[in-house]
Image (cartoon, grey):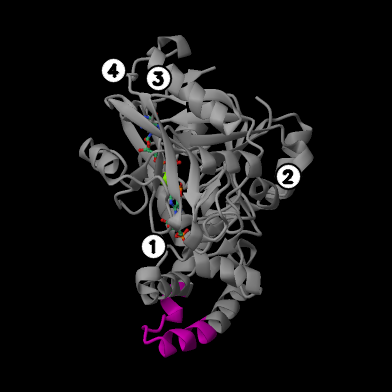
Amino acid sequence: MANTILVGAQWGDEGKGKIIDFLTEKADIVVRSQGGNNAGHTVICGSTKYVLHLIPSGILRAGKACVIGNGVVIDPVALCSEIEGLREKGVEVGANLFISDCAHLVFPYHKVLDEHRDLKKGSGKIGTTKRGIGPAYGDKAARTGMRMSDLVQPELFSSKLKARLEENNSILKALGEERIDFGEVNAAYLRAGALLAPMVTNTVVYLHQALKEGREVLFEGAQGTFLDLDHGTYPYVTSSNTTAGGACTGSGVPPHRMDRVLGVMKAYTTRVGEGPFPTENEAFGGRLHAMGREFGATTGRARRCGWFDAVATRYSAMINGIDELAVTNLDGLDQLDSISICTAYTNRGRTLEVPPSDARQLAECEPVYMEMPGWKSSTEDARKFGDLPPDARNYLEKIVSLTGAKLGIVSVGAHRDQTIVL
Ligand code: GDP
Ligand code: IMO
Ligand code: MG
Protein backbone atom coordinates (compact mmCIF):
# COMPACT_ATOMS: atom_id res chain seq x y z
CA MET A 1 0.00 0.00 0.00
CA ALA A 2 1.26 3.44 -0.92
CA ASN A 3 1.06 6.50 1.35
CA THR A 4 -2.65 7.14 1.57
CA ILE A 5 -4.69 10.05 2.80
CA LEU A 6 -8.08 8.88 3.99
CA VAL A 7 -10.70 11.60 4.30
CA GLY A 8 -14.36 11.77 5.18
CA ALA A 9 -16.16 12.78 1.98
CA GLN A 10 -19.35 14.03 3.66
CA TRP A 11 -20.16 15.50 7.11
CA GLY A 12 -18.18 13.06 9.26
CA ASP A 13 -19.03 9.61 10.67
CA GLU A 14 -18.68 8.03 7.24
CA GLY A 15 -17.14 4.88 8.73
CA LYS A 16 -13.53 6.08 8.56
CA GLY A 17 -12.56 4.08 11.66
CA LYS A 18 -13.70 0.82 10.15
CA ILE A 19 -11.88 1.46 6.86
CA ILE A 20 -8.69 2.62 8.63
CA ASP A 21 -8.69 -0.52 10.73
CA PHE A 22 -9.13 -2.61 7.59
CA LEU A 23 -6.34 -0.82 5.69
CA THR A 24 -3.94 -0.79 8.65
CA GLU A 25 -3.21 -4.45 8.01
CA LYS A 26 -1.08 -3.34 5.04
CA ALA A 27 0.24 -0.04 6.45
CA ASP A 28 3.13 0.53 8.84
CA ILE A 29 2.11 3.81 10.47
CA VAL A 30 -1.24 5.51 11.02
CA VAL A 31 -1.31 9.29 11.55
CA ARG A 32 -3.96 11.64 12.88
CA SER A 33 -3.24 15.13 11.61
CA GLN A 34 -6.19 17.30 12.62
CA GLY A 35 -9.17 17.58 14.95
CA GLY A 36 -9.25 16.43 18.54
CA ASN A 37 -11.48 14.29 20.69
CA ASN A 38 -14.49 15.65 18.86
CA ALA A 39 -13.84 12.65 16.61
CA GLY A 40 -15.35 9.26 17.39
CA HIS A 41 -14.08 6.45 15.18
CA THR A 42 -15.74 3.10 15.75
CA VAL A 43 -13.91 -0.15 15.13
CA ILE A 44 -15.40 -3.56 15.81
CA CYS A 45 -12.87 -6.33 16.34
CA GLY A 46 -14.56 -9.65 16.94
CA SER A 47 -17.04 -9.04 19.73
CA THR A 48 -15.30 -5.93 21.06
CA LYS A 49 -16.29 -2.41 20.11
CA TYR A 50 -13.71 0.36 20.33
CA VAL A 51 -14.40 4.06 19.88
CA LEU A 52 -11.21 6.01 19.21
CA HIS A 53 -11.21 9.76 19.83
CA LEU A 54 -7.61 11.00 19.75
CA ILE A 55 -5.62 7.85 19.16
CA PRO A 56 -5.38 6.65 15.54
CA SER A 57 -7.58 3.63 14.83
CA GLY A 58 -4.45 1.77 13.72
CA ILE A 59 -3.55 1.20 17.39
CA LEU A 60 -5.76 -1.89 17.42
CA ARG A 61 -3.40 -3.81 15.17
CA ALA A 62 -0.30 -5.10 16.94
CA GLY A 63 3.06 -4.08 15.53
CA LYS A 64 1.81 -0.86 13.89
CA ALA A 65 2.97 2.60 14.92
CA CYS A 66 0.56 5.48 15.49
CA VAL A 67 1.22 9.20 15.38
CA ILE A 68 -0.78 12.11 16.75
CA GLY A 69 0.50 14.88 14.54
CA ASN A 70 1.18 18.57 15.07
CA GLY A 71 -2.22 19.57 13.64
CA VAL A 72 -4.22 17.78 16.34
CA VAL A 73 -5.50 19.55 19.46
CA ILE A 74 -5.07 17.37 22.53
CA ASP A 75 -6.92 17.31 25.82
CA PRO A 76 -4.16 15.46 27.69
CA VAL A 77 -6.43 14.28 30.50
CA ALA A 78 -8.88 12.83 27.95
CA LEU A 79 -5.97 11.25 26.06
CA CYS A 80 -4.74 9.54 29.24
CA SER A 81 -8.16 8.10 29.94
CA GLU A 82 -8.42 6.90 26.34
CA ILE A 83 -5.05 5.16 26.72
CA GLU A 84 -6.18 3.66 30.03
CA GLY A 85 -9.45 2.43 28.47
CA LEU A 86 -7.60 0.73 25.64
CA ARG A 87 -5.08 -0.88 27.98
CA GLU A 88 -7.94 -2.24 30.09
CA LYS A 89 -9.21 -3.95 26.95
CA GLY A 90 -5.78 -5.47 26.37
CA VAL A 91 -4.60 -3.08 23.65
CA GLU A 92 -0.93 -2.17 23.82
CA VAL A 93 -0.36 1.61 23.95
CA GLY A 94 3.15 2.76 24.75
CA ALA A 95 6.20 2.65 22.53
CA ASN A 96 3.86 2.36 19.52
CA LEU A 97 2.36 5.84 20.04
CA PHE A 98 4.19 9.03 19.04
CA ILE A 99 2.75 12.42 19.98
CA SER A 100 3.89 15.63 18.32
CA ASP A 101 5.54 18.14 20.62
CA CYS A 102 3.87 20.85 18.50
CA ALA A 103 0.29 19.63 19.01
CA HIS A 104 -1.76 22.23 20.89
CA LEU A 105 -3.45 21.62 24.21
CA VAL A 106 -7.14 21.86 25.01
CA PHE A 107 -7.88 23.32 28.46
CA PRO A 108 -11.03 23.34 30.61
CA TYR A 109 -11.63 27.01 29.75
CA HIS A 110 -11.80 26.07 26.06
CA LYS A 111 -14.61 23.66 26.87
CA VAL A 112 -16.53 26.23 28.93
CA LEU A 113 -16.13 28.85 26.18
CA ASP A 114 -17.16 26.34 23.51
CA GLU A 115 -20.36 25.50 25.36
CA HIS A 116 -21.08 29.10 26.34
CA ARG A 117 -20.67 30.47 22.81
CA ASP A 118 -22.86 27.79 21.30
CA LEU A 119 -25.61 28.31 23.88
CA LYS A 120 -25.47 32.06 23.32
CA LYS A 121 -26.07 31.58 19.60
CA GLY A 122 -29.51 30.14 20.37
CA SER A 123 -31.15 28.94 17.17
CA GLY A 124 -27.95 29.76 15.22
CA LYS A 125 -25.89 27.33 17.29
CA ILE A 126 -23.42 24.96 15.63
CA GLY A 127 -24.19 22.06 17.93
CA THR A 128 -20.54 21.40 18.70
CA THR A 129 -19.28 18.35 20.55
CA LYS A 130 -18.41 20.67 23.49
CA ARG A 131 -14.86 19.36 23.54
CA GLY A 132 -13.34 22.86 23.38
CA ILE A 133 -12.14 22.40 19.80
CA GLY A 134 -13.04 25.84 18.39
CA PRO A 135 -11.54 27.87 21.25
CA ALA A 136 -8.39 25.69 21.31
CA TYR A 137 -7.76 26.22 17.58
CA GLY A 138 -8.67 29.88 18.16
CA ASP A 139 -5.85 30.19 20.70
CA LYS A 140 -3.49 28.43 18.30
CA ALA A 141 -4.28 30.95 15.53
CA ALA A 142 -4.08 33.85 17.99
CA ARG A 143 -0.69 32.54 19.14
CA THR A 144 -1.88 32.29 22.72
CA GLY A 145 -2.01 28.50 22.78
CA MET A 146 0.10 26.03 24.71
CA ARG A 147 1.61 22.91 23.22
CA MET A 148 2.67 19.41 24.19
CA SER A 149 6.25 20.68 24.46
CA ASP A 150 5.06 22.99 27.26
CA LEU A 151 3.22 20.18 29.03
CA VAL A 152 6.37 18.09 29.42
CA GLN A 153 8.31 20.95 31.06
CA PRO A 154 6.52 21.26 34.42
CA GLU A 155 7.92 24.60 35.57
CA LEU A 156 7.40 26.32 32.27
CA PHE A 157 3.94 24.76 31.98
CA SER A 158 2.80 26.00 35.39
CA SER A 159 3.93 29.55 34.76
CA LYS A 160 2.31 29.68 31.32
CA LEU A 161 -0.89 28.13 32.66
CA LYS A 162 -1.05 30.75 35.41
CA ALA A 163 -0.90 33.55 32.83
CA ARG A 164 -3.42 31.87 30.54
CA LEU A 165 -5.82 31.32 33.45
CA GLU A 166 -5.54 34.94 34.52
CA GLU A 167 -6.74 36.09 31.12
CA ASN A 168 -9.32 33.36 30.65
CA ASN A 169 -10.75 33.65 34.16
CA SER A 170 -11.43 37.32 33.55
CA ILE A 171 -13.23 36.39 30.32
CA LEU A 172 -15.22 33.68 32.12
CA LYS A 173 -16.12 36.13 34.88
CA ALA A 174 -17.42 38.66 32.36
CA LEU A 175 -19.53 35.92 30.80
CA GLY A 176 -20.96 34.93 34.18
CA GLU A 177 -19.17 31.56 34.18
CA GLU A 178 -17.33 30.04 37.13
CA ARG A 179 -13.60 30.65 37.45
CA ILE A 180 -11.24 27.77 36.88
CA ASP A 181 -8.90 26.79 39.69
CA PHE A 182 -5.20 26.88 38.84
CA GLY A 183 -4.19 24.23 41.39
CA GLU A 184 -6.63 21.63 40.12
CA VAL A 185 -5.86 22.07 36.42
CA ASN A 186 -2.14 22.31 37.03
CA ALA A 187 -2.07 19.08 39.03
CA ALA A 188 -4.24 17.12 36.58
CA TYR A 189 -2.29 18.33 33.53
CA LEU A 190 1.12 17.71 35.06
CA ARG A 191 0.00 14.18 35.96
CA ALA A 192 -1.08 13.63 32.37
CA GLY A 193 2.12 15.24 31.12
CA ALA A 194 4.26 12.84 33.14
CA LEU A 195 2.39 9.87 31.68
CA LEU A 196 2.56 11.12 28.11
CA ALA A 197 6.13 12.50 28.21
CA PRO A 198 7.84 9.33 26.92
CA MET A 199 5.64 9.46 23.81
CA VAL A 200 6.17 13.14 23.02
CA THR A 201 8.62 13.75 20.23
CA ASN A 202 9.29 15.57 16.96
CA THR A 203 6.92 13.47 14.86
CA VAL A 204 7.96 15.24 11.65
CA VAL A 205 11.46 13.82 11.96
CA TYR A 206 10.03 10.43 12.95
CA LEU A 207 7.75 10.33 9.88
CA HIS A 208 10.44 11.48 7.45
CA GLN A 209 12.84 8.86 8.74
CA ALA A 210 10.12 6.21 8.36
CA LEU A 211 9.41 7.35 4.78
CA LYS A 212 13.10 7.15 3.99
CA GLU A 213 13.06 3.55 5.19
CA GLY A 214 10.18 2.82 2.82
CA ARG A 215 7.53 2.42 5.48
CA GLU A 216 3.96 3.06 4.35
CA VAL A 217 1.85 5.64 6.02
CA LEU A 218 -1.90 5.96 6.30
CA PHE A 219 -3.30 9.38 7.21
CA GLU A 220 -6.51 9.06 9.19
CA GLY A 221 -8.78 12.02 8.53
CA ALA A 222 -11.21 13.06 11.23
CA GLN A 223 -14.57 14.78 10.66
CA GLY A 224 -15.49 15.23 7.00
CA THR A 225 -15.13 17.53 4.00
CA PHE A 226 -18.17 19.70 4.70
CA LEU A 227 -16.98 20.28 8.26
CA ASP A 228 -13.72 21.76 6.93
CA LEU A 229 -13.02 25.22 8.30
CA ASP A 230 -12.37 26.64 4.82
CA HIS A 231 -14.40 24.45 2.48
CA GLY A 232 -17.29 23.33 4.66
CA THR A 233 -20.69 24.82 5.38
CA TYR A 234 -19.25 27.71 7.42
CA PRO A 235 -19.99 28.57 10.21
CA TYR A 236 -21.50 25.11 10.77
CA VAL A 237 -18.08 23.46 10.62
CA THR A 238 -15.29 22.34 12.89
CA SER A 239 -12.12 24.38 13.33
CA SER A 240 -9.56 22.35 11.40
CA ASN A 241 -8.84 21.46 7.78
CA THR A 242 -10.52 18.11 7.40
CA THR A 243 -9.77 17.91 3.67
CA ALA A 244 -6.75 16.18 2.14
CA GLY A 245 -4.42 19.17 2.44
CA GLY A 246 -4.82 19.04 6.21
CA ALA A 247 -2.91 15.75 6.23
CA CYS A 248 0.19 17.58 4.98
CA THR A 249 0.07 20.63 7.22
CA GLY A 250 -1.00 18.56 10.20
CA SER A 251 1.83 16.04 9.90
CA GLY A 252 4.73 17.81 8.19
CA VAL A 253 4.73 15.28 5.34
CA PRO A 254 4.87 17.17 2.03
CA PRO A 255 2.28 16.75 -0.76
CA HIS A 256 4.61 14.98 -3.19
CA ARG A 257 5.04 12.10 -0.70
CA MET A 258 1.33 11.35 -0.84
CA ASP A 259 0.36 8.65 -3.33
CA ARG A 260 -3.39 8.45 -3.20
CA VAL A 261 -6.49 9.90 -1.59
CA LEU A 262 -9.26 7.62 -0.45
CA GLY A 263 -12.61 9.25 0.26
CA VAL A 264 -14.88 7.45 2.69
CA MET A 265 -18.60 8.00 2.27
CA LYS A 266 -21.77 6.36 3.44
CA ALA A 267 -24.11 4.94 0.79
CA TYR A 268 -26.44 7.65 2.07
CA THR A 269 -25.65 10.83 4.06
CA THR A 270 -25.65 11.71 7.75
CA ARG A 271 -24.86 14.84 9.68
CA VAL A 272 -24.69 15.43 13.42
CA GLY A 273 -25.06 18.98 14.71
CA GLU A 274 -26.69 21.96 13.04
CA GLY A 275 -26.26 23.42 9.55
CA PRO A 276 -27.61 22.97 6.05
CA PHE A 277 -28.22 19.46 4.76
CA PRO A 278 -30.08 19.55 1.44
CA THR A 279 -30.97 15.84 1.17
CA GLU A 280 -32.08 15.40 4.79
CA ASN A 281 -35.08 13.11 5.04
CA GLU A 282 -36.72 12.53 8.39
CA ALA A 283 -38.68 9.44 7.39
CA PHE A 284 -35.51 7.73 6.17
CA GLY A 285 -33.69 8.83 9.34
CA GLY A 286 -36.51 7.46 11.49
CA ARG A 287 -36.15 4.14 9.76
CA LEU A 288 -32.40 3.96 10.39
CA HIS A 289 -32.81 5.03 14.03
CA ALA A 290 -35.47 2.35 14.54
CA MET A 291 -32.85 -0.17 13.35
CA GLY A 292 -30.56 1.16 16.12
CA ARG A 293 -28.28 2.87 13.58
CA GLU A 294 -26.93 6.40 13.33
CA PHE A 295 -26.34 7.52 16.87
CA GLY A 296 -23.18 9.59 17.40
CA ALA A 297 -20.04 7.79 18.61
CA THR A 298 -18.83 10.79 20.64
CA THR A 299 -21.97 12.45 21.99
CA GLY A 300 -24.65 9.78 21.44
CA ARG A 301 -26.83 12.29 19.56
CA ALA A 302 -29.14 10.90 16.88
CA ARG A 303 -27.58 11.72 13.52
CA ARG A 304 -29.63 13.51 10.90
CA CYS A 305 -29.99 11.28 7.85
CA GLY A 306 -30.66 11.80 4.16
CA TRP A 307 -30.05 10.55 0.65
CA PHE A 308 -26.80 10.38 -1.27
CA ASP A 309 -25.92 13.86 -2.53
CA ALA A 310 -23.95 13.79 -5.78
CA VAL A 311 -23.56 17.58 -5.85
CA ALA A 312 -21.83 17.62 -2.48
CA THR A 313 -19.80 14.45 -3.02
CA ARG A 314 -18.56 15.55 -6.44
CA TYR A 315 -17.33 18.79 -4.86
CA SER A 316 -15.68 16.75 -2.14
CA ALA A 317 -13.93 14.59 -4.76
CA MET A 318 -12.63 17.77 -6.35
CA ILE A 319 -11.30 19.45 -3.19
CA ASN A 320 -9.67 16.31 -1.86
CA GLY A 321 -8.50 14.90 -5.17
CA ILE A 322 -10.23 11.64 -4.31
CA ASP A 323 -8.80 8.79 -6.39
CA GLU A 324 -10.94 6.08 -4.89
CA LEU A 325 -14.10 5.90 -2.83
CA ALA A 326 -14.84 3.56 0.03
CA VAL A 327 -18.63 3.31 0.28
CA THR A 328 -19.79 2.14 3.70
CA ASN A 329 -23.11 1.18 5.23
CA LEU A 330 -24.50 -0.13 1.96
CA ASP A 331 -26.48 -2.56 4.13
CA GLY A 332 -28.38 0.42 5.60
CA LEU A 333 -30.32 0.60 2.32
CA ASP A 334 -31.04 -3.14 2.12
CA GLN A 335 -34.77 -3.06 2.76
CA LEU A 336 -35.86 0.01 0.78
CA ASP A 337 -38.26 -0.23 -2.18
CA SER A 338 -36.76 2.77 -3.86
CA ILE A 339 -33.67 4.91 -3.21
CA SER A 340 -33.33 8.61 -4.04
CA ILE A 341 -30.14 10.14 -5.41
CA CYS A 342 -29.68 13.89 -5.51
CA THR A 343 -28.16 14.84 -8.88
CA ALA A 344 -28.47 18.66 -8.73
CA TYR A 345 -29.94 21.46 -6.63
CA THR A 346 -32.40 24.13 -7.65
CA ASN A 347 -32.23 27.54 -6.04
CA ARG A 348 -33.86 30.84 -6.96
CA GLY A 349 -34.94 29.44 -10.33
CA ARG A 350 -31.49 28.13 -11.23
CA THR A 351 -30.09 24.60 -11.41
CA LEU A 352 -26.84 24.19 -9.46
CA GLU A 353 -24.18 21.54 -10.03
CA VAL A 354 -21.93 22.89 -7.28
CA PRO A 355 -22.97 23.60 -3.69
CA PRO A 356 -23.18 27.34 -2.95
CA SER A 357 -20.53 28.50 -0.47
CA ASP A 358 -23.01 30.48 1.61
CA ALA A 359 -24.65 28.25 4.22
CA ARG A 360 -27.91 30.22 4.06
CA GLN A 361 -28.15 29.76 0.32
CA LEU A 362 -27.28 26.07 0.65
CA ALA A 363 -30.09 25.72 3.18
CA GLU A 364 -32.52 27.11 0.59
CA CYS A 365 -31.46 24.62 -2.10
CA GLU A 366 -33.98 22.03 -3.19
CA PRO A 367 -32.51 18.70 -4.28
CA VAL A 368 -33.35 17.28 -7.70
CA TYR A 369 -33.77 13.55 -7.29
CA MET A 370 -33.60 10.51 -9.47
CA GLU A 371 -34.96 7.24 -8.16
CA MET A 372 -33.30 3.85 -8.26
CA PRO A 373 -34.94 0.55 -7.35
CA GLY A 374 -33.98 -0.99 -4.01
CA TRP A 375 -32.68 -4.57 -3.85
CA LYS A 376 -34.76 -5.66 -0.86
CA SER A 377 -32.30 -8.29 0.32
CA SER A 378 -29.38 -8.47 2.71
CA THR A 379 -25.95 -7.47 1.45
CA GLU A 380 -24.26 -8.27 4.77
CA ASP A 381 -22.77 -11.56 3.62
CA ALA A 382 -21.41 -10.29 0.31
CA ARG A 383 -17.61 -10.57 0.12
CA LYS A 384 -17.10 -9.88 -3.58
CA PHE A 385 -18.65 -7.22 -5.78
CA GLY A 386 -20.31 -10.01 -7.77
CA ASP A 387 -22.05 -11.28 -4.59
CA LEU A 388 -24.09 -8.07 -4.39
CA PRO A 389 -27.62 -8.01 -5.85
CA PRO A 390 -27.67 -6.43 -9.35
CA ASP A 391 -29.63 -3.40 -8.13
CA ALA A 392 -27.06 -2.77 -5.39
CA ARG A 393 -24.28 -2.91 -7.97
CA ASN A 394 -26.22 -0.53 -10.22
CA TYR A 395 -26.70 1.85 -7.32
CA LEU A 396 -22.98 1.83 -6.48
CA GLU A 397 -22.00 2.29 -10.10
CA LYS A 398 -24.39 5.22 -10.36
CA ILE A 399 -23.10 7.05 -7.28
CA VAL A 400 -19.53 6.48 -8.33
CA SER A 401 -20.09 7.73 -11.88
CA LEU A 402 -21.88 10.83 -10.55
CA THR A 403 -18.92 11.50 -8.26
CA GLY A 404 -16.17 10.98 -10.79
CA ALA A 405 -13.96 8.78 -8.62
CA LYS A 406 -13.25 5.05 -8.79
CA LEU A 407 -14.90 2.56 -6.46
CA GLY A 408 -12.22 1.04 -4.24
CA ILE A 409 -14.01 -0.51 -1.27
CA VAL A 410 -17.58 -1.37 -0.34
CA SER A 411 -18.51 -2.01 3.27
CA VAL A 412 -21.60 -4.07 4.09
CA GLY A 413 -21.31 -4.27 7.88
CA ALA A 414 -19.31 -2.96 10.80
CA HIS A 415 -17.05 -6.04 11.07
CA ARG A 416 -13.64 -6.37 9.45
CA ASP A 417 -14.67 -9.20 7.14
CA GLN A 418 -17.74 -7.34 5.87
CA THR A 419 -15.56 -5.54 3.37
CA ILE A 420 -15.40 -5.86 -0.40
CA VAL A 421 -12.21 -4.73 -2.14
CA LEU A 422 -12.48 -4.02 -5.84
P1 GDP B 1 -16.18 7.56 11.67
O1 GDP B 1 -16.24 8.71 12.62
O2 GDP B 1 -16.11 8.00 10.25
O3 GDP B 1 -15.12 6.56 12.01
O4 GDP B 1 -17.58 6.81 11.80
P2 GDP B 1 -18.34 6.45 13.18
O5 GDP B 1 -17.62 5.36 13.86
O6 GDP B 1 -18.62 7.68 13.95
O7 GDP B 1 -19.73 5.97 12.61
C1 GDP B 1 -19.83 4.95 11.67
C2 GDP B 1 -20.73 3.85 12.22
O8 GDP B 1 -21.04 2.95 11.19
C3 GDP B 1 -20.08 3.04 13.31
O9 GDP B 1 -21.05 2.60 14.21
C4 GDP B 1 -19.49 1.83 12.54
O10 GDP B 1 -19.34 0.69 13.35
C5 GDP B 1 -20.55 1.65 11.53
N1 GDP B 1 -20.16 1.07 10.25
C6 GDP B 1 -19.09 1.35 9.46
N2 GDP B 1 -19.20 0.73 8.27
C7 GDP B 1 -20.38 0.05 8.32
C8 GDP B 1 -21.09 -0.75 7.38
O11 GDP B 1 -20.68 -0.95 6.25
N3 GDP B 1 -22.29 -1.26 7.80
C9 GDP B 1 -22.79 -1.06 9.06
N4 GDP B 1 -23.95 -1.63 9.37
N5 GDP B 1 -22.15 -0.30 9.94
C10 GDP B 1 -20.97 0.26 9.57
P1 IMO C 1 -15.64 12.02 13.16
O1 IMO C 1 -14.15 12.08 13.06
C1 IMO C 1 -19.40 14.15 12.84
C2 IMO C 1 -19.45 18.31 14.16
C3 IMO C 1 -20.23 18.66 15.40
C4 IMO C 1 -20.66 20.07 15.04
C5 IMO C 1 -19.43 20.61 14.31
C6 IMO C 1 -18.48 21.42 15.18
O2 IMO C 1 -16.15 11.04 14.13
O3 IMO C 1 -16.26 11.89 11.80
P2 IMO C 1 -16.74 20.78 17.06
O4 IMO C 1 -16.93 20.07 18.36
O5 IMO C 1 -15.78 20.12 16.15
O6 IMO C 1 -16.45 22.23 17.22
O7 IMO C 1 -18.19 20.71 16.36
O8 IMO C 1 -18.75 19.49 13.79
N1 IMO C 1 -18.43 17.25 14.33
C7 IMO C 1 -18.56 16.00 13.84
N2 IMO C 1 -19.60 15.42 13.21
N3 IMO C 1 -18.26 13.47 13.04
C8 IMO C 1 -17.22 14.04 13.66
O9 IMO C 1 -16.02 13.45 13.78
C9 IMO C 1 -17.36 15.36 14.14
N4 IMO C 1 -16.54 16.21 14.80
C10 IMO C 1 -17.21 17.36 14.90
O10 IMO C 1 -21.34 17.82 15.56
O11 IMO C 1 -21.72 20.03 14.12
MG1 MG D 1 -17.47 9.44 14.12
Q: Residue under circle 3?
A: 392
Few, some or many residues within 10 Å of mark 4 (<14, 14–19, 20+): some
**Range drawn in magenta:** 165-185
Rendered residue at 42%/37% (across/down): 369
Q: CA distance from mark 1 to mark 3?
A: 34 Å
Chain-order first, disc 1 or disc 3? 1
Ligand 2 neighbours mark 1 (CB distance < 8 Å): yes
- 2 or 1: tag closer to the N-terminus: 1
Query: Horizontal placement of 252 versus 65: left or right?
Result: right
Closer to viewer: mark 4 or mark 1: 4
- Please tell me in which quadrant of the rendered image residue 162 appears: bottom right
In this rendering, does residue 25 appear at all? no
Most common SS among magenta residues: helix
Instruction: Point out the frontmost of discs 4 and 2.
Output: 4
As measured in the structure, the alpha-carbon distance from the residue carrying label 2 to the one carrying label 1 is 32 Å
Where residue 138 appears, x then y in whole percent?
A: 57, 70
Earlier residue among tags 4 and 1: 1
Which residue was labeled with disc 1?
127
